[in-house]
Image (cartoon, rainbow, N blue to C red):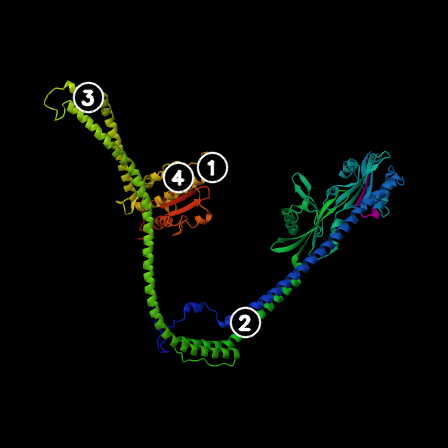
Amino acid sequence: MIAKVPTTPNSMEPYFRPPDISARAKRRSLAWVLTFPFVSLSCAAVVVAGALSLWAGEQSVQELSDRLHLQLRERIRGGLAQYFEQPKRATRLFLMALNSELVSPQNLQQVGQYSWQLRQAFDASYINFGLATGEFAGSGVGRDGLIVGERSAALGWRYEEYRADRLGRRQQRLGVYSYDHRKEPWYQAAIRRNRPGWSAIYAWDSTPEFVSINYAVPFRDRRGQPIGAIGVDLLLARISAMLKELNVHPELTITILERNGNLVASSNEQPLFVLKTSEQGSTLERITARTSNDLRLVAAFDHLNQKGGLGAVVSPLSETFQVDHQTYLLWTSPWRDSDGLDWVIVATVPRSAFMGQIEANRRVTTLLCGLVIVLAVFLGLVMARRLGRPVQSLAGAAGQLAAGQLNHRAETFDIRELDELAQAFNRMADHLRNSLIALESANQTLESRVTTRTADLAQALEDLKSAQAQLIQTEKMSSLGQMVAGIAHEINNPVAFIHGNLGVLRQYIEELTDCLTLLGLTQSGAGSGAIDPAANATIDTEELTFVLDDLPNLIQSMEEGTRRIQEIVQGLRNFSRLDQVDLKPVSLHDGLDSTLLMLSHRLKRYSDRPEIRIVKQYGDLQPVWCYPGQLNQVFINLLSNAIEALDQAWQQQMAQQSSGETARWTPTITLQTVALKTDQGPQAELVIQDNGIGISETIRHRLFDPFFTTKPVGKGTGLGLAIAYQIVVDRHGGQINCESTLGQGTTFRLRLPVGQPAADPIA
């Protein structure tokens, strides 16, 4: 019923609800609404500008890094190519002098003088010339300054070393040593490969101060056979000095490594060998990138190893890596020589060296962002103060109106939009007062209409319930009619048999009575005490024997007929469960068997359709708590539908067969029960499957809808499966579903909880 609207405008408290405090707490203040957009927009603009500035700086850093890498790579390659070209030119000139006999290889003093001149022209530390016969001559720079040396038979195959003047002339003999150039790696490599090439890096005279690499070429006779070699030593310290003189950036470190990680040269002039002293003596050990004292180089080497090592560097690369929470740029580039050198140039520089101005710009951008945010907050608060008072005044007027004071009106303001809002509010208050007066009258009329309509709906609901009950009862009576017809058919057979045998039994009894009378064994023939011979002659012995033999069979067949009637009655009693209308534990197998007994007349062969084969695959089920009579109604509905589907399938089979051809299809209904263990507890699953015509997908989704049927008008109510669904799901808390494919049969699957339910779901 609708509440009446009060007639007095000042008594509106019952009509209007008080404001929700929790909802008010979730709303935003005007200051927040006005400030947040300004702050958000300002922050977004500053952040975007800062991000673009930072991105531009990053791009500039990347471009600068690429240009610097390119410049550095070209300068190092040019310097290395120029430095390593000198021994090649020197050896070519030496060979030309020997081949043109400008210098005689047998005149070792002349050879030493010429090597001295070559050393002066090219930046070489030592120039060697040795023959396979043992003669040797050379000149260069040693620990004692400028030196020349010679080894020959005249010196007893001893190596003598002299201090030389600026013209290469011998001055003071410095010493005599047991040196044989034929045992040196540079000489052996040149003779073995018979072509120019580089030796391995070695420490000259077994001291870590003079680290050299030798370029050696074979000296051949007129037949092309090597008879000696020329070797030019280059100090690798010159390469380190060249790297240091590049001076591209003060924090830039350049290192040249072999592919195995051994140091070749570095801009910080790291030593390439370290002297290790032990009890066995002193040995020189090569320094690698991993054993270097340059932590930056060690970190770069580890980073490269994670990417495949130095062997994977086949082209110039630019990367970054971390050392002590600082980012470094890493430039790597391969360098190869046509005569076998294969090195990797590794350069590192702190990324912060290029980010100084960008960091300054970032700080300025952050400061500007903070200033803009503060200014935006200040302007937002000023605007909120300017607009807040009129809005609060309007809110107060609205509160008075909500409290029932419809005579209260809002004041005017100097802001045009807010003044228009106040005037609209006052007009709304006037319309509200008039509407409430009209609403009171309409309310009274509506109340009477609602009362009348409610009574009509209640009557319609009662009529609907009555119609539904009648339809359900009709469905039940339809099933009962089919069952009664089957029972009548089943009982009629044994009753007719017994009735037919009663006449034969009466005839047998009359014949026996006549025989007994003739024999004087009845009351009418008693008293003589002896059998009349004439009477004995009239008795047909064969007929009497037949009667005596057939009488027990006749009585046994009549007993079989009465037993069949008892089974049918017992099956009817089990099916109807008239003595078990309450919730009780029963066997599903008994219910299925009794239902099959009630439908046995429909399973038998009729017309040209063969008998429907029943396949029972019963599992080990414990009794199920249920309403037996209702479940039997479900069974008879499902089995009746299966029988009808098989009948239709047989008709289709016959229509498709040629004349005189016998169908091989056998109508079959399979009954299967399985005990299940689920999360909801133990359940019993019943599967009823037929190989009939099947159901299309469209019809299958509507099977359990009330009043839906595919049967002709007057052949079905459409409530059978709907009632089955209500009994299984609503009444027993179980599940029922249908699986079917058109032309391949139908399967109904039921699941029922085994245990006793707490209460009737629809009680």
Category of crowding for the residue at label 3, using alpha-carbon neighbours closer than 10 angstroms: few (below 14), some (14–19), many (at least 20): some
Q: Which residue is mark 2?
A: 377
Quadrant where the image shows the N terminus = bottom left
Please identify, in this view, whether the residue under mark 3 or under mark 4 is nearer the observer: 3
Which mark is drawn over residue 539?
3
In terms of secondary structure, where does tag 1 sit?
A: loop
Q: In the figure, is residue 610 to the left or right of 562?
A: right
In terms of secondary structure, where does tag 3 sit?
A: loop
In this view of the protein, which residue sits in the foreground, 731 or 71?
A: 731
Residue under the point 13% across and 23% down: 520
Which mark is drawn over residue 689?
none
Distance from the alpha carbon under mark 4 to that under mark 2: 82 Å
Query: Number of marks in the image?
Result: 4
Q: Compare marks 3 and 1 and give the one earlier in the sequence.
A: 3
Distance from the alpha carbon under mark 1 to that under mark 4: 23 Å
Residue under the point 53% across and 71% down: 35
Q: Which residue is mark 4?
A: 669
Category of crowding for the residue at label 4, using alpha-carbon neighbours closer than 10 angstroms: few (below 14), some (14–19), many (at least 20): many
Q: Compare marks 4 and 2 and give the one earlier in the sequence.
A: 2
- The three-letter amino acid code for the residue at tag 2 is Val
- The three-letter amino acid code for the residue at tag 4 is Ile
Residue 216 picture location, percent across and down: 79, 41
Q: Determine the image quadrant of residue 457.
A: bottom left
Please identify, in this view, whether the residue under mark 3 or under mark 1 is nearer the observer: 3
Distance from the alpha carbon under mark 3 to that under mark 4: 58 Å
Q: What stretch of residues is rendered in magenta?
A: 119-131
CB-based contact (under 8 Å), mark 2 and mark 1 = no
Q: Which residue is mark 1?
A: 657
Membership of 432 in magenta stretch: no
Q: Compare marks 2 and 1 and give the one earlier in the sequence.
A: 2
